[in-house]
Amino acid sequence: MLDSEKMLFQAILDNAPMGIWFLGLDGRMQFVNKTFCTALGVSEDVFLAAKCYVDVMPPNVTAGLLRSDVECLTQNGPHQSLEWLPFVDGKDHLMEITKIKVLDKDGLPMGLIGLATDVTQLKQHAKQLEHIAHFDALTDVPNRVLFADRLRQALAHSKRENSILAVCYLDLDGFKVINDTMGHESGDRVLIEVTKRIKAIIRVDDTVARLGGDEFAVLLQGLHATEECSTSLNRLLEAIGQPIEIKGKLFEVSASIGVALYPGDDYDADTLLRHADQAMYSAKQSGKNRYHLYDAASDRRTRTHHEFLKRLAVALVRGEFELYYQPKVDMCTRRFVGAEALIRWNHPERGVLAPAEFLQAVEGTTLEVELGDWVIATALKQLESWHKAGLSLELSINISARHLQSTDFAWKLKRKLLRHPPLPKGCLQVEILETAALGDIPRVSETIERCNKIGVGFALDDFGTGYSSLSYLGRLPVDTLKIDQSFVRDMLFDKGDKAIVQGVIALAKAFDRRTVAEGIETEELFHALVAMGCEYGQGYGIARPMPAEELPAWLEKWNSAPFR
Ligand code: C2E
Ligand code: MG
Ligand code: MG
């Protein structure tokens, strides 16, 4: 080999970013490159002069190195091992060492080549990645993946030990408000604080995990009685409920916790967590800031309800709701004066559904107001298109007591009306349903007055059915009473019902209110009501509720042949 070639090889070996050496069978180094010498802080001369190379290595690594040398010489193919070697920088570095046996021309071993690569950083990155994959970035507690893993282990353990395991699904109450009003940074602080409080209460063997958003899972292990579990849960509720200080202000959140107990609830890990989730929903439903133990039968019911609600929300987005319109006529002149908008659900499989089939499900939920808003918007659009076509009428919409009492009802209604500038005053009427659910009468009164100012009238629907119909009449500024159809239906046979209808009409006159009779199914009833002085009427006998586009044709027919 030429000198220039030798120098080239030397340069390549010396500059390779790994330790490279050749070890003779006698244990002496015959070559060691600069990278390795520099990293270990042992000069090439010292290495080459040593009788056995391990003599110049730190004593704690010699055994490992010698063992791998022997293994390499006795096996075929490269030998790999991991070894922590102390570097001159004072730190131990993890080295991946590959040793390759070198044979002479007779096939006898003459030594081995050693290659050492620093994998310290690689391993650190792998560890970080593993951490990211298993821990929540914000709170640094296990995530859903690791929780599921721990839960499986815990299940096996409690099977062996015959102990109780509680899987808790925890959702914060009131978190969204803080997050929305105070910003995400404050929301994050709440989550971190809540995590800290949970960690302070559970035992070392227990696990708290963040499942996402404001949802956590807690695994309580090694319990010997269910009472132990309830003590822990109460302490959790108590700790989470303490005020949290953010930017100098105190905030309060609480938690709704669903709990599935093993072995009572003898299922696999996934099912247990799902049951805990369902029980959490029940805890929310029954008033929040509490825990609820999973109970198959009742939780199935709440789940069905929950799923039905979700389906209704989808129906709203998909435009499956439609308003039908039932005409209302002046009893004396027989003139068509208006219509009542009644909601229908055009269900893709079940056909047209009446409100009785779905409205109850939305009671008390946010969907109740969303659906009500949809009714208002749709009714106004329809009203405008009728007015533009020269059909003037008064349209009634049904509004639930809760919707009416929602904040800014009057203001929002005004804004909706402003989107339809051609509409004259007095063309919209709100029918108040379930008056019994009206809580704060003075406030409702104020809302009605504010709506009156923008030309919206009010009616008390189903008048006479509630115990307190009478007292509302005096205290609410409504202009119309709708006589409930249950009295109208039987008034020709039932003296009591007839007396009620007569009474309501007289009452309305005394209070200067208008009356509308609903449920007029026959011409006979119609005439009887005219005779009693009822002003307006609607019912199947006049017209059934119908899609908007059918109204003009009905009107033409009615005008040519109304009840005589
Ligand atoms: P409601 O406001 O008292 O409406 C009158 C109900 O009686 C309507 O039932 C109507 O179809 C029915 N009806 C009208 N004339 C007759 C008749 O001659 N005979 C009989 N047997 N029934 C008659 P519908 O459409 O099923 O609505 C039931 C209830 O659902 C309504 O009672 C109202 O409380 C509620 N509702 C309907 N639409 C809406 C809505 O858009 N929003 C809200 N919140 N509730 C609504
Ligand atoms: Mg009504
Ligand atoms: Mg009614």
Image (cartoon, rainbow, N blue to C red):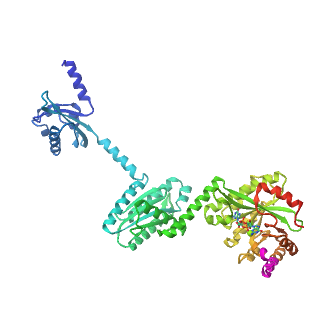
Vertically, is 22 above or below 342?
Answer: above
Q: Nearer the viewer, residue 397 or 550?
A: 550
Vertically, is 331 above or below 111?
Answer: below
Name the dominant secondary structure of the magenta segment: helix
Residue 285 at x, y percent in the picture: 54, 67
499 in the magenta segment: yes
Q: Nearer the viewer, residue 506 or 335?
A: 335
Q: Residue at x 26, y 42 (%)?
A: 94
Quarter holding the C terminus? bottom right
Quadrant assignment, res 116: top left
Tell me: 120 left or right of 326. Answer: left
509 in the magenta segment: no
Is residue 484 in sight in this rendering? no
Q: Residue at x 55, y 59 (%)?
A: 177
Residue 467 at x, y percent in the picture: 71, 78
Quadrant assignment, res 152: bottom left
User: How many labels were placed on the picture?
Assistant: 0
Residue 185 at x, y percent in the picture: 50, 53
Quarter holding the N terminus? top left
Q: Residue at x 50, y 59 (%)?
A: 248
- Magenta segment range? 488-503
Tell me: 156 left or right of 115. Answer: right
Is residue 69 in sight in this rendering? yes
